Amino acid sequence: MMVLYATDVSLYSAKVAIALEHKGAAYERRAPPGGTYRSAEYRAIVPAGTLPAIDDGGFVLSESDAIIEYVEETRRGPPLLPADPRARARARYASRIHDLRVEPRVRALFPFVGAPQGAPAEAALDALREAIAALPALIAPSPFAAGAAFGLGDCGWAPTFFLADRLAAALGAPAIRYDPAIRRWRDALDAVPAVRTVMAAYPGAVEAWIRSKIG
Ligand SMILES: N[C@@H](CCC(=O)N[C@@H](CS)C(=O)NCC(=O)O)C(=O)O
């Protein structure tokens, strides 16, 4: 059976788990050997040393989008990419926007959790707010990133929005404002069974991580 190397708090692990759940793919979730992507044992299996990764009968692959596209092409189940070429392109585009423009700005908040606050934290929060405010123009979900059906372009967003909100609160900042179009997208995401399944466990892992940082 395909192995998914993942940790509970890893946002990209949640992104791929959502895709696998939606596809109905059989997989066994495993923590990286040594418990962290930093371990030499994990890097011996996954040279890139990032989470998540899969091992499908000896075929090892990292990078969330590459994994999701591989699963799409090798497993039956609800499509993760639409048939129409332009809609497919929009799904891939939305996933890139997530990975390149929004998630890095959530990740940029990590060092400030449990650390002295100030102007750098404010600036990082402003950058994240700006990226989220740009989303209606960049993606215009209706209700999903590439149209009527949930898919690749949607998989990363529920964990990222959750983490953005939770980290803003942990930093004592005002709540992040979401355009109504993005609020409707979030509602649509929250109603997808695969998102519900994965997001049932994610907040607890984030809380434990935040507690460990603020001690
Ligand atoms: N581009 C990668 C990003 C994955 C990623 O950054 N994962 C984090 C955990 S959520 C990680 O492995 N960080 C360790 C590192 O970057 O060295 C993907 O899409 O899978």
Image (cartoon, rainbow, N blue to C red):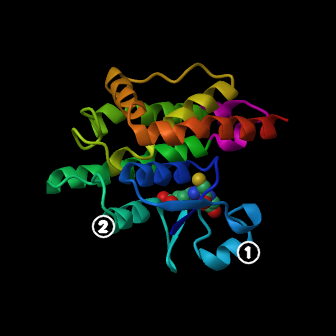
Q: Which residue is mark 1?
A: 40
Q: Does 22 appear above or below 115?
A: below
Compared with 147, 129 (above or below) is above
Residue shown at 40%/65% (left/top)? 66
Whether 32 is drawn above or below 131: the answer is: below
Between residues 14 and 86, which one lies in front from this camera angle? Answer: 14
Crowd around label 1: few <14 · some 14–19 · many ≥20 (10 Å): some
- Residue at image mark 2: 73
Evaluate whether residue 100 shows in this view.
no
Give the residue type that dot 2 points to.
Glu
Quadrant hosting ligand 1: bottom right
**Tag 2's secondary structure?**
helix
**Horizontal and vertical percent for residue 153?**
34, 48
Residue range corresponding to the magenta coloring: 109-122
Residue pictured at 31% horizontal, 56% vertical: 77
- Mark 2 C-beta closer than 8 Å to ligand 1: no
On residue 99, which mark appears? none
Q: Amino acid at mark 1?
A: Ala
Q: Is residue 87 magenta?
A: no
